[in-house]
Image: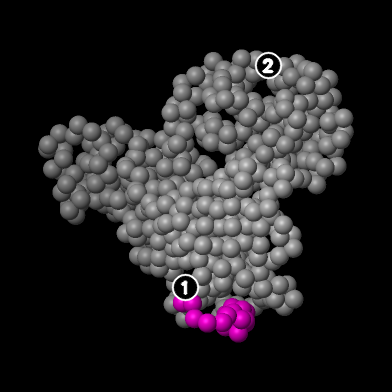
Amino acid sequence: MKKTKADLSFCKNPVRRYFVLPAVICFPNTRQDLWASLCCGLFIAFLSPSLYAQTDTLTVRGKVENLSVRLYRQAPEITVARVNILQANREIVRAAPLQPDGSFELKMPLVYPLEECYLTYANVVMPFLGAKGTVKVTLNGDSLTKSDVPLQFEGIHAATNNRHAQFYADFNKWLKANPEKPVKAANAMLFWEKAASERQRKIDFYRAYTKGKDALLDQWVTSSLNEAAKAQLYNYLTQQQQTLPLALSAAAELDTNRFFTFAKADSYRQFTNYALATTPNVPESSLPVSTLARLILQYVPNITPADSLKLVSYTQGETAKMRELKWLSNLFNRKEDTLRMIVAYELFTRKFGAAHSVKELDYLKAAFYAENINNFSLKNLTLWYNHLRPSLQNPYYARSLDELHHIESLDSAVIRTAESKIATATVDDPLEVMPGIWLADTPSYPNETMLWNQLKRKFKGTIVYFLFWTNDEWGRRALAEANALRASMPPNSVEFVYVSEYKTNDDVWREAAIKSRSRGLHLKVDESQNDYLVAEWAITQVPYAVLIDANGKYIRRDAPLPADREGWNKIWTKIFK
């Protein structure tokens, strides 16, 4: 189960939202926009490759002293986590196994010169500042449950990290004894007044607490508190469907300095949610011909010199004549699939560029890619990445985008292999795409009960755990968490079957199964199979799990999800007698 970050970082798990452009049929009023109507009607969720940008590397090494055999068995590894500014709800985690003497070492790539990271070991969860170089951490195994700060930092920013660790523990004690009150207000100005007052209360505690001068610690704490207040404001505006008052523009401005914290990531996330919820549609839901001409020149191959000259004239402002529309349509159709995806992004930038500053739009451009990760295939993501990457002005947005695309592209060879072979993979003869990860095609059966009966026959004699998941944040999380559950069970005691709902795109389903690294059999059902299983398993919410015994009889419908430790504790002895 995912640990919750303590209060100082103000790290939340926000509900994931998606950029959505409605399907539009355009009937533009001007000749200049008439051609653009050919490119609309695309449903799209908003949110290789060029060289992956070089990043800095943080090395974290250290030792757990007084490491007992019992502690080693309970906690055999140490982890460090950070986030990407484009994906506040998805941690980037590196783990290091403990050596017999308690030592460990891991390396973490960094995008910003200074990044807040979280170190986790056993019951200890502690933030620290990471930068290029080495942070050394010493933990005392005897003090993990006895001391508020059972660790010591050395290396880069050691003094600041040690001061912050003690403040972090004491701040959370104070906050527990003096909790903040829920902020209620009739409008944004009143809300901000109360949120700013609460922020100042916490800053006053810090000023009274701290001893000595530490400019870096000041920046760390005050930045986190400022970003938390801005996140609250943007969340309020989103919930109330209100726009940001002009008087608060400076207070709520995106902070683009080189100091990056979890709180800043959440603030940017809340800004994105706000932009999606409140940005009005532009009067013309189409692109000017000058833009379409530029895109045709960029993406359509083998254009004649004469056609190129004509297209260039459009990019320079010449008006398109009605009789030239068929010619333009023919050029567009030569790369229609590609151009439709690119036009979707261009429409997005047009809509949000009309309502937001250049600095805000620069971030939203990069966020477009991040918001589409779970909804489109790697092929489409790569197309968007290559198109939008050169336009980003902020180097840290660009590096953050590079990092996300690098992560998404790691399994590209496996994905291509799966795509070429999945058609012949069946439930009884599935395709092993990676060790222990099997995919099968589920063609339409004459009877919707046949798939369920086939699965019970296939796994007769074995306990089976079925996880029904949907392509959203909660479904993907459950899919990924299944690995830890499987690892906690006796070897080869339970088979895992992952069933994707029918609405998920086939390419997206295959890629999600591969990227999850979840061992077992992965299936995607059609609509009739989906409806049958919903009724047979009594599914009332998703994700959803079912356990059957070796004879195909239900142990439990609505079984615990992978991360539900309490639920598993209740039925563990029943399964593993």
Among numbered discs 1 and 2, the one appearing first in the sequence: 1
Q: CA distance from mark 1 to mark 2?
A: 67 Å
Q: Quadrant of residue 573?
A: top right
* Residue identified by numbered label 2: 446
Q: Which mark is residue 13?
A: none
Identify which residue is drawn at 62% across, 48% down.
102
Does the magenta segment cover residue 200? yes
Residue 479 percent across, percent down from the top left: 64, 38
Question: Seen in the image, is 500 located left or right of residue 505?
Answer: right
Q: Secondary structure at mark 1?
A: helix
Residue situated in front as seen by the camera: 524 or 8: 8
Identify which residue is drawn at 21% across, 46% down.
321
Q: Which mark is residue 216?
A: 1
Residue situated in front as seen by the camera: 282 or 18: 18
Dominant SS of magenta comes to helix
Identify which residue is drawn at 17% across, 47% down.
312
Q: Which residues are magenta?
A: 196-215
Residue 80 percent across, percent down from the top left: 56, 52
| Amino acid bearing label 2 | Pro
